Image (tube, rainbow, N blue to C red):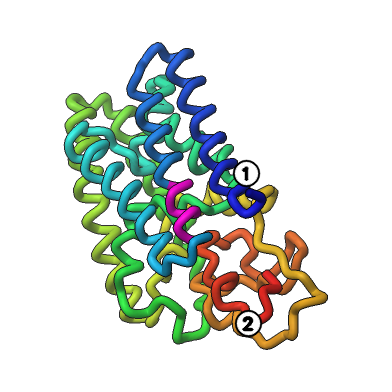
């Protein structure tokens, strides 16, 4: 049963969040929402343990489509960063603010950037593209993410300062238009840089939260130096170019690990 500890741990974490929010917010939706996400993630990790090659993709589709289609398009919740700023400014702790607190601010203390690997609806689409492993050297343009982060904040702040009416409707259309822009930009960058995850590395504003908290993540890929033969396979297959042979928290691109386990699957000596 030891090998099933990880999926059980993830299930317990999300089920705990589900029950606490259900009882404190007196809303049954939170019980369903976080239970569903927890079960989907645990199921994906279980499939990985069983060596099903599309395990992570299953979870990506289960969670990503649920959040994009049901929460975003059907329920009209803006789950993008603009929605987070909006609910934060009106002082409402629900929807996007809870989502960000669990998945992107406090959650990464436990599971790092697992959100990027298993639940992001943008990456869900980008991972279908042909460049699963980067074919070009990493570009020094990561500063763009700080611009998109600031732009989202300034956009919502401007709406409030201008006392714009019908902000709820604007939030809905911002979600739709914002996602379309993310997909278009992400696909263009993927083909331009021959890297499916170029958008995640250079443009995505969410990483501002994730990179900071992921540094302290409890769940990390570690290398058994006694087994490692320094073949470099892990570096070649990592979509985020993380140096997993270095166990320190300061390892190269360490805060960008999305826990895709490609390095673990491909390590010839099971050192990871």
At 32% from the left and 28% from the top, the residue drawn is 160
Q: Earlier in the sequence, mark 1 or mark 2?
A: 1
Q: Is residue 149 visible?
A: no
- Circles 1 and 2: CB atoms closer than 8 Å: no
Q: Which residues are magenta?
A: 41-48
Q: Is residue 150 visible?
A: yes
Against 7, is 261 above or below?
A: below
At 62% from the left and 67% from the top, the residue drawn is 253
Q: Secondary structure at mark 2?
A: loop
Query: Per the image, is 43 magenta?
Result: yes
The residue that disc 1 covers is: 110
At 38% from the left and 82% from the top, the residue drawn is 194
The residue that disc 2 covers is: 268
Residue 142, x across and y down, in percent: 51, 66
Against 67, is 75 above or below?
A: above
Q: Main secondary structure of the magenta part?
A: helix
How many other residues sit within 10 Å of disc 1, few (<14), some (14-19) or many (≥20)? some
Residue 25, x across and y down, in percent: 42, 14
Q: Secondary structure at mark 1?
A: helix
Residue 96, x across and y down, in percent: 38, 33
Which quarter of the figure is the C terminus placed in? Answer: bottom right
Judged left or right of residue 266, residue 186 is left
Asked which quadrant contains residue 230, the reply is: bottom right
Residue 58, x across and y down, in percent: 35, 57
Against 28, is 45 above or below?
A: below
The front one of 243 and 89 is 243
Query: Per the image, is 133 magenta?
Result: no
Against 148, is 77 above or below?
A: above
């Amino acid at each position: 049963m030891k090998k099933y500890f990880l999926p059980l741990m993830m299930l317990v974490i999300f089920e705990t969040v589900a029950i606490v929010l259900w009882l404190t917010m007196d809303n049954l939706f939170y019980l369903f929402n976080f239970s569903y996400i927890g079960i989907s993630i645990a199921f994906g990790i279980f499939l990985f343990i069983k060596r099903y090659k599309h395990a992570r993709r299953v979870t990506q589709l289960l969670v990503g489509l649920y959040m994009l289609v049901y929460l975003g398009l059907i329920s009209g919740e803006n789950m993008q960063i603009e929605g987070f700023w909006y609910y934060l400014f009106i002082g409402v702790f629900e929807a996007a603010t809870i989502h960000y607190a669990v998945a992107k601010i406090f959650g990464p203390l436990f599971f790092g950037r697992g959100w990027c690997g298993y639940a992001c609806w943008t990456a869900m689409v980008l991972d279908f593209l042909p460049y699963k492993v980067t074919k070009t050297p990493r570009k020094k343009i990561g500063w763009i993410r700080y611009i998109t982060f600031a732009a989202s904040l300034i956009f919502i702040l401007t709406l409030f300062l201008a006392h714009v009416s019908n902000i709820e409707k604007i939030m809905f259309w911002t979600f739709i238009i914002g996602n379309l822009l993310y997909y278009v930009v992400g696909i263009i960058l993927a083909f331009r840089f021959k890297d499916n995850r170029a958008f995640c590395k250079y443009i995505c504003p969410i990483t501002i939260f994730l990179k900071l908290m992921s540094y302290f993540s409890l769940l990390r890929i570690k290398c058994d130096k006694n087994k490692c033969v320094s073949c470099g396979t892990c570096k070649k297959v990592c979509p985020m170019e993380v140096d997993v042979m270095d166990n320190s928290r300061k390892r190269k691109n360490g805060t960008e690990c999305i826990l895709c386990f490609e390095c673990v699957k491909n390590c010839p000596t099971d050192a990871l």
